[in-house]
Amino acid sequence: MPTTLRMIVDQVIAPVPGPLGVYSEALTRALIQVAPPGCEVEGIVSSSAPADTERLESEFPGLAGLYKTTLARRELAAAWQLGLTTSPGGGMIHAPGLFAPLRRHDRTVSGDQVVVTVHDLLAWTHPESLTTASVAWHKGMLKRARKHADAVVVPTHALAERLANVADFGDRVRVIGTAPRPGLVAPSDAADVAARAARLALPPAYLVATGTLEPRKGVLDLLEALGRPGMPDIDLVVIGPSTWGELHLATVAEEAGVDPRRVHAIDTTDAADLSVILAGATAFVAPSHDEGSGTSLIEAFSLGLPVVHSDIAAYVEVAAEGGLTVPIGIGGGYTERLAAAISTVVESPTLAERLSVTASDRAHAFSWRDSAERVWQLHADL
């Protein structure tokens, strides 16, 4: 009788999978690939269309089975939030987020165990970035996790420390890092690169950043930095939407003194497109004020891209001096320091080359295989 790890894969087929969908897909694939002898991986998904089930089965060759609940995702999320008995059964359950059947159990008797994952604390630190319903759901599910989860996975030690200020999980917290998304590799086909660059309308030289115009993401600071007098004449590609609420990227750029024609929003999650965008950039800039993980830095590192990043704890931990750190500070001056760092990298090929080398070296510390092996070990320890 094989030992089965049951992975909740619902986010992979969500209408907007987002970063959590990427994480779920990558980790599930790796869990299947590194399953120890005598072990297997099953999937758990909410009631969904046959086409979605077929997609999951094709996405995860080697999946031992796929359990479909009787409730659709929205109803299932509400039921699990209220602690209702709707359940996909027992065994070892691993949730890539807080969407999990958290209920009273004694693993020493039944052998059942539930592990959840926390990627950020936005419901506490920046509730304005979420809907009221989403804030309530996250807070309710973390409360249930504190009572019933056998372990909680977080991507960084920085987030583990912040989580301790929100809920006391004692020694149940485990730090298991992330890695670049599947398919994010250095482009090798020159014709394909040229075709994608033309379709994406990439400029000849540019910086790249990810995120929205939400203030905590720091893109507003980045635009202000690029608009300062004496800054290099280089374009900016923002991987994300062009609008956030009533703010529009072109308008904000113009107000910051940056020619709107030099700022480009490319809202894509396609790994091949992202590979071309990142590989062709002069540098990657991560100006965020609040992140739970540093996955965006890891992806930039994986392509040998010079990285300029803020000094938030998660970035400092992930970068480990592999990038150029810019202190946010308390009394102002962040945009000036950010502008100085960017100018130095753009105008100094020697520094850019050194950062490229340290980026490639740092990228070796992250792999989905390692993350999956640590997940298997966590469940074995439990």
Image: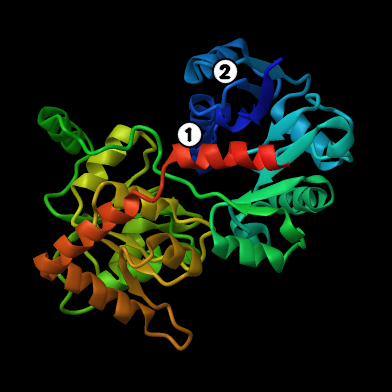
Characterize the local packing of mark 1: few (<14), some (14-19) or many (20 or more) Cα atoms within 10 angstroms: many
- Residue occupying image coordinates x 25% and y 44%: 277
Considering the numbered disc 1 on the image, is that residue within a helix, a strand or a loop?
A: helix
Q: Amino acid at mark 2?
A: Leu
Residue 222, image x, y percentages: 33, 67
Mark 2 residue element:
loop
Residue identified by numbered label 1: 26
Q: Residue at x 77, y 45 (%)?
A: 150
| Quadrant into which the N terminus falls | top right
How crowded is the residue under tag 2: few (<14 C-alpha within 10 Å), some, or many (20+)? many
Q: Nearer the viewer, residue 167 or 136?
A: 167
Q: Residue furthest front?
A: 37
Q: Which quadrant of the figure has residue 341?
A: bottom left
Amino acid type of the residue tagged 1 in the rendering: Ala
Please give the label number shown on residue 63.
2
Q: Earlier in the sequence, mark 2 or mark 1?
A: 1
Q: Is residue 66 left or right of residue 178?
A: right
Q: Residue at x 76, y 62 (%)?
A: 167
